[in-house]
Structure formats: structure tokens, C-alpha cells
Image (spheres, rainbow, N blue to C red):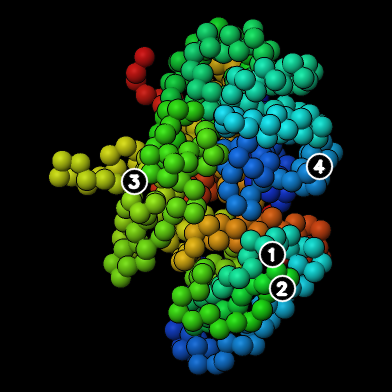
Amino acid sequence: MPATRPLPELVCPAGSLPALKAAVDNGADTVYLGLKNDTNARNFAGLNFDDRTAREGIRYAHQHERKVLLAINTYAQGGDISRWHRAIDEGADLGVDAIILADIGLMEYARRRYPELRLHMSVQSSATNYEAINLAQELFDIRRAVLPRVLTLDQVKQVIDHTRVEIEVFGFGSLCVMVEGRCLLSSYATGESPNSHGVCSPAKFVRWEHGSQALGARLNGILIDEYQQGEPAGYPTLCKGRFEVEGDTYYALEEPTSLNVMAMLPQIIDIGVAAIKVEGRQRSPAYVAQVTRTLREALDTAGREPQRFSVKPGWTQALSKLAEGQQQTLGAYNRPWK
Amino acid sequence: MRIPELTLPASMASLLGRLPATPPCWALVTTLNQLKKRDILPADMSLLAGHSFEVHVQDAGLRLGFSADEKNFKVASVGDTPDLRLSANLADFARMMLREEDPDTLFFNRKLIIEGDTELGLIVKNLLDSVDWSSTPLQRFMAV
């Protein structure tokens, strides 16, 4: 195992200025954020950055020699794509270190207008093989690609071995149903989905019903789940609901779990992953601080002594408390499929 | 500073529940207005105006009702169905305010109850999260 591999960048989420500062203060190498509109996939009321907070956040991060990425990771909707172009213009003007894009039309615009601007390919692009990534590099000079959470560790290595594009993988956070960039479940219930409106299960369609026995979660009237007294709740997304299928009521699509790759950090470093991403721009500064601090320590430890690395109980405890569904999984990384 | 795992005794709730809620409610509303006036609370009042809110401190038996207009927060009687009700024990509210605990975590753990307009709840949550305490003298109390 070569000890000379550089440590992957720790890329942490920020939905607000205090979250950005919490990420920087607790050891993030890079912070990613979005603007206050549907050009990003966490388009939640009251979340994200305006010009003033973005400038202040970038100033703070750069002062501490950290990087800032701007996520413009929804698909420009027909009719009026000027908002997406303006977001790219704004990112270039703000002086972000890179823009994360999903839509190849926007990649073309950004490359043409701002030849010097560093571009990352979003997980929402659903690029799971090196041919797709290399094509994006050839066409738009993409410097980094974020892999969807569907590949095993061997498959991630296979991608890394066949591309010069940096590879970023998810390290912690709520899991998607594994068709990232292509999921329409939210649209099925509400007419709005991450790719089109920048939000899965928009809050205006969500109703929590407090019954005497259970807490019901409804999305546009559709009952998604019922949580009994004391049972952990989750985000009200269709993919994580419990549904009746042929007489059985269960998590028919996916259980609400959080990804946590801590146990695999030495292998992730060894195969040459360039960056590890933490999910959760919708979460508060307290979450960002706790996750960043824990992963920073774990990553540094894994880099120092990869052979003897083991996950400390304190790290697991800190992260499991924050996890949706209170369960953690290595996700696809350790699946046996080839 | 860590908030200890603590629930107020039931006697406290029955005692406090019998006292008028107006003084603590007035204190809450005054604090909110002061924070807003000093630009510490970056509230977009157009999103909050016309809505009624209740903070229910369960173990203290306290129900603090208030509303908002285009300019300010006001003490208000909100009835049985405010547009948004947030319920939790005192220690969990304190953890949330001091950034020791993430509201989503408390919600997943069923320690924070959100009733009413979910989007309004998100607006309020994100508003509290966006307060940059590091620009205020209160910074040293904050966990992050």
C-alpha cells in the first residue's frame, strides 16, 4: 500500500453562512453551497446564499485557505434558461474555486464564457463509467466528477484507473434511491423533482399528522409512512416510505439509512479518490460541525496509519446520532455485485 | 458548554402552566425584534407576515404564542391551531438554539414536534440556522 497517496479533500455542505464557517472551523478542505433559487438541488425556503452571504463566505474560506464550490446542479428548464446562465455568471463573478454542474448545456455555456473557470460534474449527471466522464472532459474540460452512490469500491477503482478526471465520492449522509440524476418519484406525487425544481418532496406538499398513536407523513395527500411512538422518523420522501405491497407493509423501495464510509477510508485513500463529499446542505450548522470534525479526525488517522486504522467508537457514536433512520451503511461500496 | 440530559419535573410544568404566559412570551417577542433590528436575525418578514406561531416548551408547560406582521413580531393569542407549532423540552430547545444539536436530528429522534405549515417550519428553521452568532457578543455560548 503506497503511503504517498495524498489525502482526499474533505468536501462539506453549507446551507447558510454559519454552516460554512462551521465547516471551515472544523476542518473541511472545501465547502459547497448553492444560491437562493432553483438552480441548485436544495432549493428550500430560507436556505442557501445571496450575494452578500456568498461573498462573506468565500472571503472567510479563502482567508483560511479553503476552497468554495458552487452547486448549479439542476437541469435548466425549457422556456427560460437565463436563471441558470445568470447563476454561472454569478459564480464566476464571486470567484468560486469551481462550479458543480449536471446539465451538459450549462457545461458548454460555462466553458465557452469562462474558459478559466474550473468545472466539476455533479452526481446529478449520473455518470457512472469512465467513458461518460472522459467524454465530458474532452468536450468541456471537466476537472472532477462526483460519482453516484451506486458503484462498488472495485468499480470506483476501475473508473479512477481509466480517467485523468479527479473522482469525488460520497462519504456520509442521507442516501438516495440510487438513480441519482434520474429520479422522478417526487414528481410523481407533486409535479416537482430535484432535477426540475431543485427539491425532492417540496415542503409545501408535506403534512405531518399527529395522531394519538402515530405520526403520519403525507406528501400531497399520499400517506408515505406512519411512525409509532418513539420510532425514529425520516425525511418524507417517497423512496423511503413504507407501502403495502401484496399484503405486506414495508420499505418497498429503500430503508431510511445514512451512508458512512469511515470503515473504508484506507481503501478509499489507496485507490486514489480525490475528494470525499458529505451530504446535507439542508442540515444545520450543528450537523456540519459534528460531521466535519469527526470525518476530519478519521481521515487524518487513516492517512497517518492506514495499516492499523480502525473506526473509533466515539466517531461512530457521533455520526450515528445524526444519521437519518439511525442506521448506517457502507452502501454500494461493499456490495458483492460486479 | 454542554447541556445536560435533563427533563424538568412534572411539578414544574403544572406550576408554570398555571402562571400567565404573557411575561415569557413578551420577552421572546422583544428578543426577536431586537435581534431583527440589529440585523442579527436576517428575517425576511414578508415570508412570516400574517402567520401565527407557538413555541411549546413541553416540560415547562409553557405555550408562547406570537405572530408577525411586515415589520415586527407581536405577542398574540394564537388559539388551538397556530400556523406553526414547535414543541420540545426546554433542554432540547436550548441545544437547538446553542447549536449543540441539529433540529433535523431532534426531529428524527422525535424530540422536536413540528405541527402545522411544514414550509413555514422550514423557513423558521433555516432562519435560526442562518443567524451568525460569531458577529455578536453571544458567540462564546455557541457550540459551533
Same chain for mark 2 and mark 3? The answer is no
Q: Residues within 10 Å of mark 4 (few under 14, many from 20)?
A: some
**Which residue is the extreme one toward the front?**
A79
- Asked if disc 2 and disc 3 are in contact, CB closer than 8 Å, the reply is no
Closer-to-camera residue (A320/A163):
A163
User: Mark 1 near mark 2, Cβ–Cβ under 8 Å?
Assistant: yes
Q: Given this view, does label 4 or label 2 mark the residue nearer the observer?
A: 2
Tag 2 or tag 1, which sits nearer the N-term? Answer: 1
- Kind of residue at badge 3: Gly
- Reading the image, the residue beneath label 2 is B72
Asked whether the viewer can see residue A26, the reply is no
Give the farthest residue toward the left.
A247
Q: Amino acid at mark 4?
A: Arg
**Residue tagged by mark 4?**
A55
Q: Residues within 10 Å of mark 2 (few under 14, many from 20)?
A: some
Q: Residue drawn at (77%, 34%), measured in percent from left and top?
A: A90
Q: Quadrant of the C terminus of chain B?
A: bottom right
Circle 2 chain: B
